[in-house]
Image (spheres, rainbow, N blue to C red):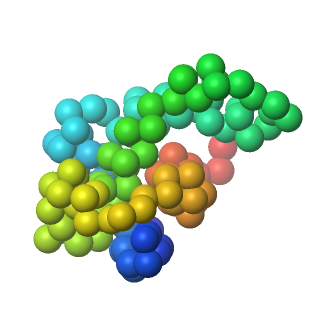
Amino acid sequence: MEKAITIDGKSVRLKTSGAFPMRFQTQFHKDYFKELLKIAPLGKLGKKKQFDLSDLEKIDFDLFYDIIWTMAKTADPSIPEPLTWLDGFEEFPIIDIISEIQDMLMAMLQTKKKV
């Protein structure tokens, strides 16, 4: 799956592919699918009418930066290492970006088989 989003006024191509989880593993030394399961509390926050800051402590927001960088690297192998790439943005509204990539994250977990 591929799409372009705007981050800090710049068009950024993002892509997932069969190699995406391995690229994530190679760069960050973490299993993509295990890490993705750790953000499950975020879905629960959207269903609550009220939440406190302790709910946010359960979420590793660095994971989102890692995922977004990996998507960008999959789309464009010439982008620099994560910190250098992120330094190229004055603003990086992670909450807005997460909502734009949600469909890409879900597509990596879903099956096309009828169960």
Q: Residue at x 66, y 43 (%)?
A: 115
Would you place residue 115 above or below residue 77 in this image? above
Rendered location of residue 47, percent (x, y): 79, 37
Side (left or right) of 17 relative to 95: left
Q: Quadrant of the N terminus?
A: bottom left
Would you place residue 78 above or below residue 43 in this image? below
Q: Residue at x 57, y 59 (%)?
A: 96
Side (left or right) of 30 relative to 60: left
- The residue closer to the viewer here, 54 or 115, is 54
Rendered location of residue 107, percent (x, y): 53, 56
Q: Which residue is drawn at 38% across and 55% down?
A: 68
Would you place residue 60 above or below residue 54 in this image? below
Rendered location of residue 49, percent (x, y): 85, 35
- The residue closer to the viewer here, 19 or 60, is 60
The reply to whether residue 16 is in sight is no
Rendered location of residue 69, percent (x, y): 30, 56
The reply to whether residue 68 is in sight is yes
